[in-house]
């Protein structure tokens, strides 16, 4: 920890304000309230996230608040790490086999660091989770950590807190998970064949570890794909055929989209002979880093071509420098809080894809970035011309209230509202889903209220747009 003694917050009420995130101006606030009230109870469309489908298939009770709210959420662990807690202190195991804090200890660390979340988007989500999902009425603190822990352990043991009951209470209409192409999708199959389950949970095809030929374990990943697909993946053509076969498997289990976390959005469309030469060189350890990067872009282009044929929406997430701290990656692995946004170029990078598929009747893409300077300069103009390209919502570091407002300001005047894809919660924290969607609804209601107050649009049009942002647009963009 950072050595600073936190003032006690024990006894302070935890009660999120009903007008949080709505405009301060009284005229705009009144309009925003009406708009928000018109959509607050709409079902949730969750087209991109990282909830484990086994959670719903098994429907086992959550054991404790730390493993539910803290350890799996890198939004939480990264900031506590910045204030001095190790990732072991927060429940993450490492490659060295160091002792890992028990859940109660993790919860104590979280409560002790509660004040460090002030002003962050995470604080708003966690407050809503604690208050509206888990019934907590006091702010966490070092003084009440054990009492809150015991209270929440008892509450989580009740039938109303089991995953399927929460799914229903959250009002989730459809939940998309993110899945490795080698996954047999048995948990999705279990849900689909369970007569007691009526929810819609669909897989999403995430082929990064087979497409990114710059990764150290890329060749070993090809063996996993070959085993899952039954197709020899030791040649370029074999790898492409194996990916196509697994895409078909995912479609048969309800998938409507793929997901690509490429470091940049550039794609290549090389002759097969040249692609095969690159593949053999990379697999044989004879390629330069530049050649490995080119092969990765070629394989990303192949996935775009596949989407034009099988109709799976291509969601492209770019602009992240993954695993920025090499020692942490080596010790704890990926997705442990040190992926960092970086500048990203789209106009030239997407041109090869859009020249081929930008007006293709079956091709559809949703493009996300962590570089918000690209919103108005590149992405909004591109989405304002190409029918196949939809603007992904502010994502990850940008799915915060003020960043969401900047997004609407940046893209709407060029592309309008209806070239955007609604909202994605992009979360591993199951209980944060309703809180994140509620944040987006409040922010969009405030943005639309300002346009109504300025007499740019009518309140009736604003209500229609807000409904579309939360229903029609995500369904259309992700073919749900």
Image: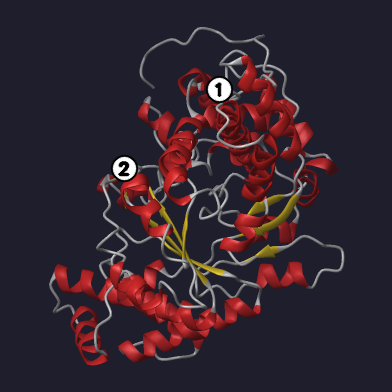
The x and y percentages for residue 45 are 66, 53
Q: Residue furthest right?
A: 196
Q: Residue furthest front?
A: 455
Q: Residue 353, relative to residue 315: is it above or below?
A: below
The residue that appears at 29% across and 73% down in the rendered structure is 352
- Residue 339 shows up from this direction: no
Nearer the camera: disc 2 or disc 1: 2
Q: How is the image coloured?
A: secondary structure
Q: Which mark is residue 111?
A: 1
The residue that appears at 43% across and 10% down in the rendered structure is 5
**What is the CA distance from the residue labelled 2 to the residue labelled 1?**
35 Å
Answer with left or right where residue 470 lies relative to residue 162: left
Answer with left or right where residue 351 lies relative to residue 359: left
Residue beneath label 2, please?
A: 373
The x and y percentages for residue 263 are 31, 58
Say which element carries label 2: loop
Looking at marks 2 and 1 on the same chain, the residue that comes earlier in the sequence is marked by: 1
Say which element carries label 1: helix
Question: Toward the viewer: 459 or 129?
Answer: 459
The x and y percentages for residue 475 are 64, 60
The x and y percentages for residue 139 are 63, 17
Answer with left or right where residue 260 lies relative to residue 161: left
Q: Residue 309, relative to residue 183: is it above or below?
A: below
């Amino acid at each position: 920890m950072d050595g600073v003694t936190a003032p006690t917050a024990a006894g302070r009420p935890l009660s999120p304000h009903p007008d949080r995130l709505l405009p301060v101006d009284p005229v705009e606030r009144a309009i925003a309230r009406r708009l928000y009230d018109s959509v607050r109870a709409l079902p949730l469309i969750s087209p991109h996230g990282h909830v484990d489908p086994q959670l719903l298939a098994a429907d086992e009770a959550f054991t404790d608040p730390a493993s539910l709210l803290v350890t799996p959420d890198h939004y939480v662990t990264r900031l506590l790490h910045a204030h001095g807690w190790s990732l072991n202190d927060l429940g993450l195991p490492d490659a060295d086999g160091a002792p890992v804090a028990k859940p109660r200890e993790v919860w104590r660390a979280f409560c002790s660091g509660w004040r460090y979340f002030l002003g962050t988007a995470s604080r708003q989500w966690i407050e809503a989770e604690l208050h509206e999902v888990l019934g907590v009425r006091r702010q966490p603190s070092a003084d009440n950590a054990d009492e809150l822990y015991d209270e929440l352990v008892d509450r989580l043991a009740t039938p109303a807190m089991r995953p399927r009951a929460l799914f229903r209470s959250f009002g989730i209409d459809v939940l998309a998970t993110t899945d490795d192409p080698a996954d047999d999708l048995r948990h999705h199959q279990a849900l689909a064949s369970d007569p007691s389950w009526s929810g819609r949970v669909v897989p999403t095809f995430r082929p990064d570890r087979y497409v990114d030929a710059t990764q150290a374990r890329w060749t070993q990943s090809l063996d996993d794909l070959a085993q899952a697909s039954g197709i020899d993946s030791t040649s370029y053509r074999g790898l492409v055929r194996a990916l196509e076969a697994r895409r078909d498997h995912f479609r048969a289990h309800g998938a409507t989209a793929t997901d690509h976390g490429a470091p940049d959005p550039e794609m290549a469309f090389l002759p097969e002979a040249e692609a095969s030469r690159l593949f053999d060189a990379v697999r044989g350890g004879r390629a330069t880093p530049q050649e490995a990067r080119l092969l990765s872009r070629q394989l990303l282009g192949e996935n775009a071509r596949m989407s034009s044929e099988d109709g799976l929406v291509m969601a492209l997430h770019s602009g992240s420098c993954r695993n920025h701290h090499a020692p942490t990656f080596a010790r704890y692995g990926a997705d442990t809080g040190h992926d960092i946004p970086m500048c990203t170029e789209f106009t030239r990078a997407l041109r090869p894809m859009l020249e081929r598929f930008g007006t293709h009747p079956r091709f559809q893409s949703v493009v996300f970035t962590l570089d918000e300077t690209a919103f108005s300069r590149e992405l909004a103009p591109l989405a304002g011309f190409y029918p196949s390209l939809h603007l992904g919502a502010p994502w990850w570091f940008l799915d915060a209230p003020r960043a969401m407002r900047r997004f609407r300001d940046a893209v709407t005047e060029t592309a309008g509202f209806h070239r955007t894809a609604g909202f994605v919660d992009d979360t591993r924290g199951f209980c944060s889903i309703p809180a994140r969607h509620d944040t987006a609804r409040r922010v969009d209601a405030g943005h639309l209220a300002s346009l109504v107050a300025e007499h740019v649009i009518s309140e009736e049009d604003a209500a229609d747009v807000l409904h579309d942002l939360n229903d029609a647009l995500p369904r259309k963009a992700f073919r749900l």
